[in-house]
Amino acid sequence: MSISEEKLNELLSKKNQADLLVETLGQLRVIRNKEELNDKSWGRDKALQLFEFLVTARNRMALHKEQIIARIWEDASQKEGDNNFKVALHGINKALEPERKSRTEPKYISRQGLTYRLKKEIVWIDVDAVDELIEFANEQLEINVDLSILALKEATKLFQGIYLPNRIYEDWATVERERLQVLILGAYILLGELLLGSNPLESIRLAQNALQMDQTWEDAHRLLMNAYMHKGNRPSAIKAYKNCVKILDKEFGIEPLPETEKLYQEIVSG
Amino acid sequence: MSKRINETVSFVVRFTQKIFEDKNGEANVQWRGKISHVQGSDQKNFIEFEDALKFIQEKLDQLTIANIDGKTDEEKEGILTKSWDIWNKMSKAYPKMVLDAIKDPKAQVSQIQEQIAQVSGELSQKIEIDSWRPPSKADYHKLEEMMGQMSDQMKTLNKKLDDLSKKKSK
């Protein structure tokens, strides 16, 4: 087994090794020792909210309690904020470690003075896995395309929907949601292009996924046209082009890029 | 506990850059934008940043109107006036549009835009840059007439706003 293959295996096996799994894409699922936590496990929504915030802020240094309160409960008075935080933190620790003995250190939430963070090194989080797989796929593009395809397939499989859909109106989750959408759009297109020759049907599906996320994504329109041509379906390729023209005109009042026009000319001229 | 009011409007702006060669073989660049309103989840695609500004203004206006509900007419007027003053400073090119957006979100904005475009068109036709000359009396008259029209329009809009406020307070 090559070093690259070993690295990919290592990335893929992380999920099996962690005893706490957090899925944030499409819907929040928290699985502890292979058992999924339900709404009741969290007690109040505040606990879930704080947990989701700590997951979102996982790549930052530990955050001061005041900073956390200001981001999540910005309208709360100091007393309310402190109370919310206390209740929420207790809820998290109870949900994640119901059998933890009192006065012992929580396993997943690290506390130093008044700063807190999620110990992401012992937790498997889907968005981190997506990041690592896409990074690996990009590295492998010029070394081993097959491994790149494999990693991209795994990454796109993990994308079950937008980041924390239950927090779409919260400021603090927005940046991460936008970052992931753009990352996944890129992954769909790259994987779709890599699969054009071997599996154009899958390229069609990936292009459609990208367009569902952003109907103005011109790379996805072009991928769709190309994929239909690889399937030998010229009418659908032409239809895809016309749809692209219509959407770009409606949304931006612009024409497709010369690259798209050129592809269309190639399609019609056979 | 008193009712909490929403005081925050957030936006995410995404730009996608496209660099391409146009039909004449000239290198070209295009910025495609998308602005999303976080609290309301509306989105708008744009090429001109002015369109993004309009989108932001609409949302800010909605927030102001929502937050002055229940106040007296006098207070409402004061808050709206102050809010517009801030906008005058922040976005000099669009103060009137804020007013329009508050009253009748799209129709009046586009109407005034059309009028401005028409006036600019007329002016550019009248004063050729190559034959530049000091403005004549006729030009002054024309400008006066246009400013008068705009001032009347502002008055009408203000009246509409007052009526709207009165209706709400009833």
Image (spheres, coloured by chain):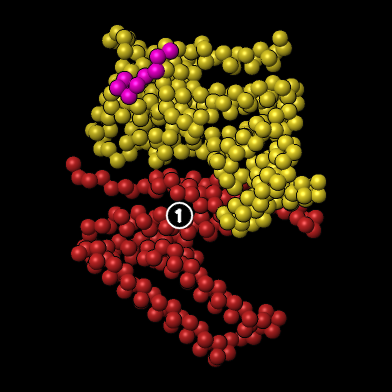
- Residue occupying the point 28% across, 33% down: A81
In the depicted structure, whether residue B157 falls above or below residue A249: below
Q: Is residue A74 visible?
A: yes
Q: Is residue B88 visible?
A: no
The percent coordinates of residue A118 (x first, y second) are 42, 21
In the depicted structure, whether residue A37 falls above or below residue A80: above
Residue B103 lies left or right of residue B137; in this view the side is left
> What residue is shown with label 1?
B56
Amino acid type shown at disc 1 = Ile
- Shade of chain B as shown in the rendered figure: red
The image quadrant of residue B80 is bottom left
Which quadrant is the C terminus of chain B positioned in? bottom left
Based on the picture, tell me whether residue A36 belongs to the magenta stretch. yes
Residue A249 lies left or right of residue B94; in this view the side is right
Q: Which residues are magenta?
A: A34-42
Report in which chain the residue with disc 1 lies. Answer: B
The image quadrant of residue A226 is top right
Residue A216 lies left or right of residue B19; in this view the side is left
In the depicted structure, whether residue B47 falls above or below residue B157: above
- Residue occupying the point 70% across, 51% down: A257
- Residue occupying the point 39% across, 39% down: A170
Which quadrant is the N terminus of chain B positioned in? top left
- Shade of chain A as shown in the rendered figure: yellow
The percent coordinates of residue A121 (x first, y second) are 49, 17
